Amino acid sequence: MADKYIPIACQLYDKLEELAVKKVKTKITYLDYYEEKVVEDFIVDFRTKNKEEFLILANGIEIRLDKIITLEN
């Protein structure tokens, strides 16, 4: 993605970690370029590359953290 990464709030990161540790299936709405997408899966890992933070879902999808719009569990 060509747009600049904007770090997320610590509270959101803590919530994402909690969902991953507790293995809670989560519905995530996020932006993929300019398209809004919805996926429901388990968060299995977090990764940083090129100073951008991503979560990894069980199905292999990587979502840049600043592209998350909503979380539902």
Image (tube, rainbow, N blue to C red):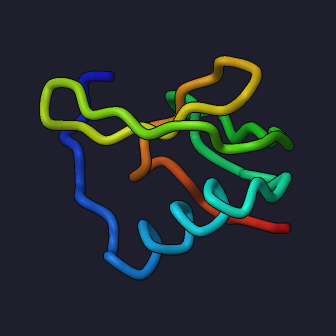
- For residue 32, above or below residue 13: above
**Nearer the observer, 73 or 70:** 73
Direction from residue 29 to residue 46 in the image, left or right: left
Q: Quadrant of residue 11?
A: bottom left
Q: Position of residue 58 (x, y in %)?
A: 73, 28
Q: Position of residue 69 (x, y in %)?
A: 60, 60
Left or right: 7 in relation to 10? left
Which quarter of the picture shows residue 53? top left
- Quadrant in which the C terminus is drawn: bottom right
Closest to the observer: 9 or 34?
A: 9
| Mark count | 0
Relative image position of residue 2 (x, y in whole percent)? 25, 23
Residue found 43% across the figure and 49% down from its top: 65
| Image location of residue 16, percent across then percent down | 55, 62
Location of residue 29 with respect to 4 vertically, above or below: below
Residue occupying the far bottom of the picture: 11
59 sits to left or right of 61: right
Quadrant for the N terminus in the image: top left
Question: Which residue is at a point 76% across and 54% down the rendered structure image?
Answer: 23
Q: Residue at x 54, y 26 (%)?
A: 62
Determine the residue located farthest toward the front in the rendered image. Answer: 21
Q: 36 or 19, which is in the foreground?
A: 19
Which residue occupies 81% across, 59% down?
24
Residue 71: name its quadrant: bottom right
**16 to 31, vertically: above or below:** below
Residue reaching furthest to the top: 60
